[in-house]
Image: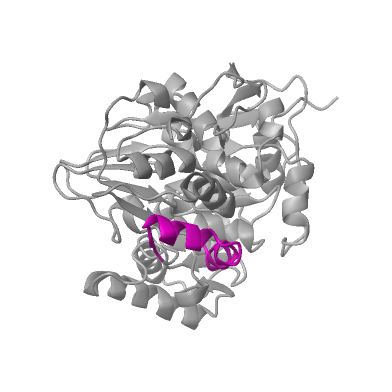
Amino acid sequence: MAKPQTITQKILAAHAGKDFVEPGELILAKVDIALANDITAPLAIRAFQEAGAKQVFDRERVVLVLDHFAPNKDIASATQCQIVRRFAQEQQLRHFYDGGEMGVEHALLPEKGIVGPGDLIVGADSHTCTYGALGAFASGVGSTDLAAVMITGEVWLKVPESMRFVYTGKMPRWVTGKDLILATIGDIGVDGANYRAMEFTGEAIRSLSMDERLSMANMAVEAGAKNGIIAPDEITLEYVRDRALRPFKTYASDSGAAYLAEKTYDVSRMEPQVAMPPSPENVRPVSQVKDVRIDQSVIGSCTNGRLGDLRLAAQVLKGRKVSSGVRLIVIPATPLIYRQAMDEGLLAIFMDAGAVIGPPTCGPCLGGHMGILAPGEVAVATTNRNFTGRMGHPQSQVYLANPAVAAASAVTGRICGPEDL
């Protein structure tokens, strides 16, 4: 009888051409998608060329997205993008995204059906783990590792041990997948899942929209995880069925599969969570964050720039105004999300409230552009990291929250939940 395996083990075994892989085992696995952006691709391209390679392993499976400093903010970023653009043209890559087609990579790839259940995806970006929400194994790698993948279509991996996170109960209003993952990181710490697979399950997970699942998997890396993953269900299949560009296979963990640890959270009494600077593990319920005045609120990024996130923020902002002295920046994550938000009247709600609406870009999340903080300034953001200097000056501060909290805080001028309005 076959030995029980987790969903992560099964996907890795399938891509290594094996029936079973053991946690800790080193494997050479075939890659479905290799991804890079305008910061990481130039390094990978240089390593690719220095290795003497002439052609990527598959021009349908190498994906390049210009999203971090795009639209270009200066000469250096324009040059980076030029390197990637030329390489994409020379290699005739099917999936190269620039200009009006460009979106934040980790929102764009699921939306376009480039990634799907059962895939093995590596990307030269730490938040590649987002795609685990679809039931894929997805993980970030370095640019030189990515160059090797672009040449061979294969990657060396150590099979991670799995940790199981079970979420029970019914989600209260204004509590989202972002809050579940913040609460989890607050509990286990930023190294609590170091090189492990974080498997999310339970009744609360099954009730989450695809947008919220993508938010949760996105931040697995903030707990040090190799990957975050949610087994596909009907919500997943409904999302991928009409999008998937390739046939896909769904996997689920066997009963009796071995886990390094299991944690259970009852979400029924949870409130929106806030990560205080300077770490995503410094988490408190919003009601315990008192009198923190803000200069800026950012709604967007690969964590919370999807349509569901914008709808949630618009619910809070409708008929209200941004507080005097606060800058509210809203960045839809892809052109399609931008268009849908426009068609639904969400952009009008944001503009009426006094927000600035940006084109799809990572922008302020990484301290790139379109919302950099000055010395002493404080921001609340729906992004995923709040390390010192992350969004600008080392003397600025970033608080992480869900879109409803970011919107409510923009209205009051201090960090608060929507219940406070």
In this picture, is 32 found above or below 55?
above
Bounds of the magenta segment: 333-358
Q: Residue at x 81, y 27 (%)?
A: 2
Q: Is residue 6 left or right of residue 94?
A: right
Q: In what quadrant of the picture does the N terminus appear? A: top right
In this picture, is 115 found above or below 206?
below
Please, which residue is most extreme toward the front here?
A: 319
- Residue 265 spot, x, y in % from top left: 59, 18
- Residue 187 spot, x, y in % from top left: 45, 19
Q: Main secondary structure of the magenta part?
A: helix
Q: Residue at x 45, y 61 (%)?
A: 36
- Residue 144 spot, x, y in % from top left: 39, 56
Tell me if residue 119 can be seen: yes
In this picture, is 354 found above or below 274?
below
Work out whether residue 289 or residue 151 is closer to the camera in this orientation and state it.
289
- Residue 337 spot, x, y in % from top left: 56, 62
Say whether residue 265 is magenta.
no
Work out whether residue 59 or residue 189 is closer to the camera in this orientation and state it.
189
